[in-house]
Every structure is written in structure tokens, then in C-alpha cells.
Image (tube, rainbow, N blue to C red):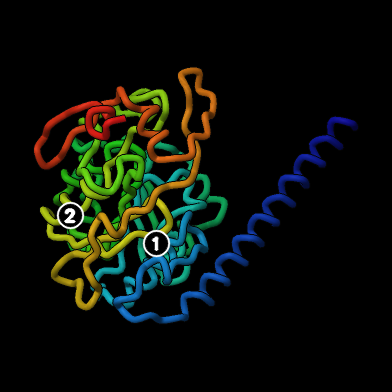
Amino acid sequence: MRNLLRQARTFFSREIKNEIAMAREEARFLAGVQMSRQAYPADTPLKEVAFRAFSQAGEDGVIQHLIRHVPIENDLFVEFGTDNYDESNTRFLLQKDNWRGYILDMDPSPAQFFAERLLHIRHTIDFKQAMITRENINELLKPVAGDIGLMSVDIDGMDYWVWEAIDVVSPRILVVEYQSHFGPDLPLTPAYSSNFSRFKNHFTGLCFGGSLAAMEYLGKKKGYDLVGTAGWHNAFFVRQDVRGDLPIRTAKESWVEVRYRDSRDKDFNFTALSTLKERQHAMRDARLVNVETMEEKTVAEWFGV
């Protein structure tokens, strides 16, 4: 009897938690819908249009702004690097605007989240579990090849090299995470590795991704203009042939110094480093490549720390 009572309490506790979580999500969604009704001129700075329903730092509002000013012929998005998809850059697009979606992640949790929320039944969204590399990314993207509305890249590692390799899809809007720790001026990223891990690369966990200047450089090579940043880690690019009246922003004016403090020491303890110089000094022996010159140096050599 006691065992049955424990099982019943566990079941009802789980159900109550799920009901509370879904009620909160509905409130976030409705608030996002309300905020999305506000239209802004094309030249409005992205930080002024930002809001979050399901995104992390205002990306939902920026994307709503951009799809008003960028002509979209194929309302299909691709996002990779989403964790369980609860907090993502494209979920609001899926649920509010009924876009079609394709999710890639090495973690299997999006499949469970889709099932719990019936997202794959109520909407057209598919998930592929995979470790993403520059060698396999085009094969993974073949199901959605061609001109698509939006692509979001956030894999906490080889973001620069993976974006560089992509040639089977041509998103009109691109959201890519950049690494604020590398400053606003130099086009830097770690050298390519197909099995990259941020804490294996450097114990601080700070040396991953590409600087905003590196992403700006690559964007120009691939036919994209930087139109700004939102929050503190995502940059937004628009394909040059559809940019219209959206103004071009530079990496230097768009860069934002992050304020989150997730650095670690060699024993994996949080160190809560607060300034850019402190973070750069902590990873001073890590190595970075200048993607314009392909010169490789330590962080200490690049930044004099």
C-alpha cells in the first residue's frame, strides 16, 4: 500500500509540474504574440525590437522584425544547437507563424520535448540527432536544401568552420552565435577540430566559437551583411540580395561584452570572472586562428594579456 501511495504521489507531482510548465509556456507565448504586433522601421536598432518568448536573449523579437522586412518565399527554418528546444531561436516562429522546421542536435532530448508538447504533430518539424562537423553538415542539410527562410547556428564550438562549409542551403536570414570573449576587433576562432569540446579545448570553457569580426568576415565572403546583434551572444545576418532597407552594421559597433560568469578553473570550479581582460588572461595559453591571415597565436599574444 505504501509503495502504491508513493507511486501515486510521484505521478500526480509530475503531472502538476507539467501542467504548471505548460501554463507558463502559454503565458510566454501570448505575451510574445502581443509584443510581435508592434512594427518598427527597418533602420531600428535590433536591441530596440528584441523580446523573448522562447528565445534566450531577445532573438524572438529580432526575428519577427527581420521577417517583416525580408521577403520570405520558403517559410522553412533550420536550427542546430538547441538542447531540448524548450529555449530556442525558432520555436516562436514555429508556433506563432506556423513555419516548417528542421532541428539538428547531438543531444536526443528534442525528440522527447516534441513528444511531450506534440510539436511534431501540431506542426511540421523534424529532428535529426547528429554530431555536427564541417565534413557532414551538407549531408545533414540535404533534406532542406535550397533557398530557405532562416538558419540558426549555435553549437558552442566550431560555429565558424561549420558555417563556412555550408553550401547546400541558402538562408535569407542567418542567426549565429559569436564569442564576445575574443573582443570586437580581430577575426579569431579556434583551429578546426571535428571532435571539438569547449572544456577539453581549454579548462576555462571560454575558448570556443568565433569572434564577431570573424563572423562578419565570413558573412561578406558568403554574400551576407551583418545587420546587428541582440542580447549578448547572437549576431544577425541577411543575404545581400534581399536585405532591402535594413542597414548594415559593423562588428565593432555591434559587439556586446557578455556579463554572464560561467568560467571554470582547472578543477572545474566556477571562477566568476567579471571583465573581458580577466577572461582573456584566464585563457591566455589557448590558441586562436586569425581567419583572414590564417596566423595562429595564443590569446596572450593576440591581446597582450
Which label is found at residue 124?
1
Tell me: residue 157, above or below residue 169: above
Amino acid at pointer 1:
Thr
Q: Within the image, what quadrant is residue 106 found in?
A: top left
Looking at the figure, which quarter contains the N terminus? top right
Q: How far apart in space, not on screen, are marks 1 and 2 (Cα)? A: 29 Å
Circles 1, 2 touching at the beta carbon (< 8 Å) = no
Q: Within the image, what quadrant is residue 160 found in?
A: top left
Looking at this view, name the residue that lies furthest to the right: 1
Find numbered disc 2 in the image and state the secondary structure of the residue it sits on. helix
Q: Is residue 267 left or right of residue 169?
A: right
In x, y percent, where is residue 161?
20, 40
Q: Is residue 240 left or right of residue 59?
A: left
**Which of the two residues, 190 or 70, is positioned nearer the viewer here?**
190
Q: Which residue is mark 2?
A: 219
The residue carrying pointer 1 sits among few (fewer than 14), some (14 to 19) or many (20 or more) residues within 10 Å by Cα, namely some
Q: Is residue 114 visible?
A: no
The residue at the point 46 percent across, 80 percent down is 38
In x, y percent, where is residue 39?
41, 81
Amino acid at pointer 2:
Gly
Q: Is residue 234 visible?
A: yes
Find numbered disc 1 in the image and state the secondary structure of the residue it sits on. loop
The residue carrying pointer 2 sits among few (fewer than 14), some (14 to 19) or many (20 or more) residues within 10 Å by Cα, namely many
Q: Is residue 210 left or right of residue 197?
A: left
**Which of the two residues, 254 or 157, is positioned nearer the viewer here?**
254
**Which of the two residues, 230 or 277, is positioned nearer the viewer here?**
277
Which mark is nearer the camera, 1 or 2? 2
In x, y percent, where is residue 227?
26, 65
Tell me: residue 149, above or below residue 145: below
Which mark is first along the chain, 2 or 1? 1
Looking at this view, name the residue that lies furthest to the top: 267
